[in-house]
Image (tube, helix red, strand yellow):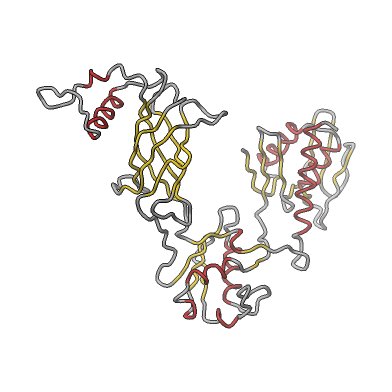
Amino acid sequence: MHGPLRKTCSIFILVALLFACWATPATAQYLRIRDICRVKGQEQNTLHGVGLVVGLEGTGDGDRPTTRALAKFLELLGNPISIDSQRQPVLTELENAKNVALVTVTATVPAEGARQGELLNVLVNAFSAKSLEGGHLMVTPLTGPRPGDDNVFGFAQGPLSKDKNGPATAGQVHDGCRLGRDIANNFISDGKITLVLDKHHASFQTANEIEKMLNNPEVSGFGLGRSKDRSKLADSFAKAKDQVNIEVRIPAVYQDDPVAFASEVLDLQIIPPRHDARVVIDKRNGVIIVGNNVGVGRVAVSHKNIAIQTGAAPGDGPLFVVDQENDTNTTRLQALVNALNGLKVSTEDIIDIVEALEASGDLYGKLIVK
């Protein structure tokens, strides 16, 4: 068996085993709510600014915006350039500054926020310079997170390091931004926290299951972790607002300690939700992942010298795919793909067949192609 084919078969076996483990509540593994949810307000924020990188070996830009920014920077440092009769800087004095580049500067604040004096990594990208290799970022104020917000949250500076596999016009400064003020993410609104389902798990069914679990202290697995005191959550109330958001009122006993309440809610265990029927194809790497609940209608597949038929009666081909369910009008896509693998059909050809099934309307699931 060839390497790519063996890799693809291994992936199918792994997916099948995972779904087998989650098949029934009695044998199901459990996840914590935090594994598929986050608390609203706990999101990453990005600080941004425009700065100058110096020390380049003739690979800067020297464009008018760069020289204008350089003139302003020199003025702030007490070394202004000449001005004309209109009291504007004479930018021609800087027209040969090829070792300077105008860059964008960004720093990501983690979801839990950050405090004054904390250091963050900085990403730097050139506007039009040829390379930032060996450059040094000059002091740059960072504002944000919303464009147009003039509040300065920190200052970035330092020597650039470049990713070996990245473009020459990008780099980063490790711990290059020092925050000048706290950035705190509020997670409470009107005495409630809001659980936000991850986009890959968001559904009406999952939101409803979490709501019912939080509202019913008798549900298996419901509790307060270490304390084991279910009565403390007796006055809590959860309400699914849609397939993504579940509002949870903070009970009176936790009014003075909402952090503990959020922690206990996120640690509650749930049965992994059932996914929608999906097929994910990564053409670049030749990978196919088939969900266990993806079906195929009664079809006949002809490929080169191979003929395969799904459904109730065998066809004329060398292999008949036996349905795994009582309903012989459909079969599992995984069974069809396994049959194609057994006949040594290439991964590229299997991808073409799956796409053709989707185009004909005989693929019962969502096809995602990357």
Where is residue 79 drawn, in percent x and y? 22, 29
Viewer-side residue, 122 vs 280: 122
Q: Looking at this rendering, what residue extends furthest in the front direction?
A: 78
Judge by depth and name the residue closer to the eye, 212 or 306: 212
- The picture places residue 46, in percent across and down from the top left corner, at 42, 46
* Quadrant including the N terminus: top right
Task: Give the quadrant of the C terminus.
Answer: top right
186 relative position to 328: left or right:
left
Q: How many labels does the image show?
A: 0
What residue appears at the point 76 percent right and 61 percent down from the top-left corner? 23
Q: Is residue 95 above or below residue 284?
A: above
Going 60% across and 67% down the picture, which residue do you hit? 267
Q: Does residue 231 appear in this view?
A: yes
Residue 184: image quadrant is bottom left
Q: Using the image as rendered, state which of residue 222 and residue 57 is in the foreground.
A: 57
Residue at screen point 68% across, 34% down? 285
The quarter of the picture where residue 263 lies is bottom right
Q: Nearer the viewer, residue 334 or 90?
A: 90
Extreme-left residue of the structure? 85
Q: Residue 312: percent from the left, percent from the top? A: 85, 50
Residue 205 in view here: no
In the rendered image, the vertical position of residue 112 relative to residue 344, given as above or below: below
Q: Position of residue 310 (x, y in %)?
A: 81, 45
Query: Which residue: 71% across, 44% down?
Result: 289
Left or right of residue 69: residue 238? right
